[in-house]
């Protein structure tokens, strides 16, 4: 008899497909930055527009925010100072770019560990100070990853003009 995946397992699969696992929809967030040069990551399409590097750190921040809401962790525990959008690059070095990619990977792993501890019942709960259920929050993170993956793909094409 075939075992049916729990809702939590299905959601973890959706989150991973949007982040770094093969799926039908094409490039996911992690795939969109694979092999990207420092110059491509820092390139801006226009003044006061976000670059790929900033999209990466922004995505890491929202994975952290979802993790914090699921775990009840205190605000202000994100490794970088600030919230939502972080001006990048502060230092235009390969090391700084790789550190921010590692931050994105770390925030994804941290979130996935928290999701792995949820029960199906937990998915329908609305955390304190939130307007949406844990399921809506997490499915939103998957959509957020894919939204920014698409932006990154477009920025890469624009940067080659």
Image: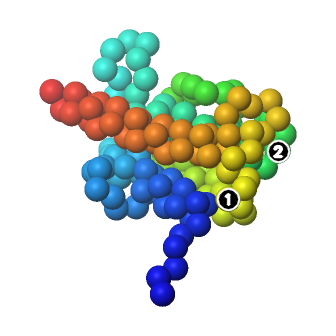
Residue 28 location, x and y as percent?
37, 49
Corner quadrant of residue 17: bottom left
Between label 2 and label 1, give the one nearer the viewer: 1
> Which residue is drawn at the image coordinates 34% and 46% (left, top)?
32
Q: Name the residue under label 1.
A: 120
Residue 130 location, x and y as percent?
74, 31
Above or below 43: residue 11: below
Question: Furthest residue to the left?
Answer: 161
Alpha carbons under labels 2 and 1: distance apart? 18 Å
> Which residue is drawn at the image coordinates 43% and 23% (left, top)?
50
Among numbered discs 2 and 1, the one appearing first in the sequence = 2
Type of colouring: rainbow
> Which residue is drawn at the image coordinates 29% and 50% (left, top)?
25
Residue 122 location, x and y as percent?
73, 53
Mark identifier at residue 72: 2
Considering depth in this image, is 13 or 61 the residue closer to the camera?
A: 13
Q: Tell me the element at label 2.
A: loop
The answer to whether any part of residue 149 appears in the image is: yes
Residue 27 location, x and y as percent?
31, 49
């Amino acid at each position: 008899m075939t075992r049916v995946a729990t809702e939590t397992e299905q959601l973890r699969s959706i989150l991973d497909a949007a982040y770094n696992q093969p799926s039908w929809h094409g490039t996911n967030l992690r795939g969109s930055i694979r092999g990207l040069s420092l110059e491509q990551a820092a390139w801006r399409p226009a003044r006061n527009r976000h670059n790929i590097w900033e999209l990466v750190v922004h995505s890491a921040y929202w994975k952290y925010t979802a993790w914090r809401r699921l775990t009840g962790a205190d605000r202000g525990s994100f490794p970088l100072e600030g919230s939502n959008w972080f001006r990048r690059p502060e230092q235009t070095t390969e090391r700084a770019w790789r550190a921010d990619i590692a931050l994105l990977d770390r925030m994804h792993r941290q979130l996935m560990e928290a999701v792995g501890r949820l029960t199906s019942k937990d998915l329908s709960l609305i955390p304190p100070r939130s307007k949406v259920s844990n399921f809506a929050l997490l499915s939103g993170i998957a959509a957020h990853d894919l939204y920014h993956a698409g932006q990154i793909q477009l920025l890469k094409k624009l940067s080659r003009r």
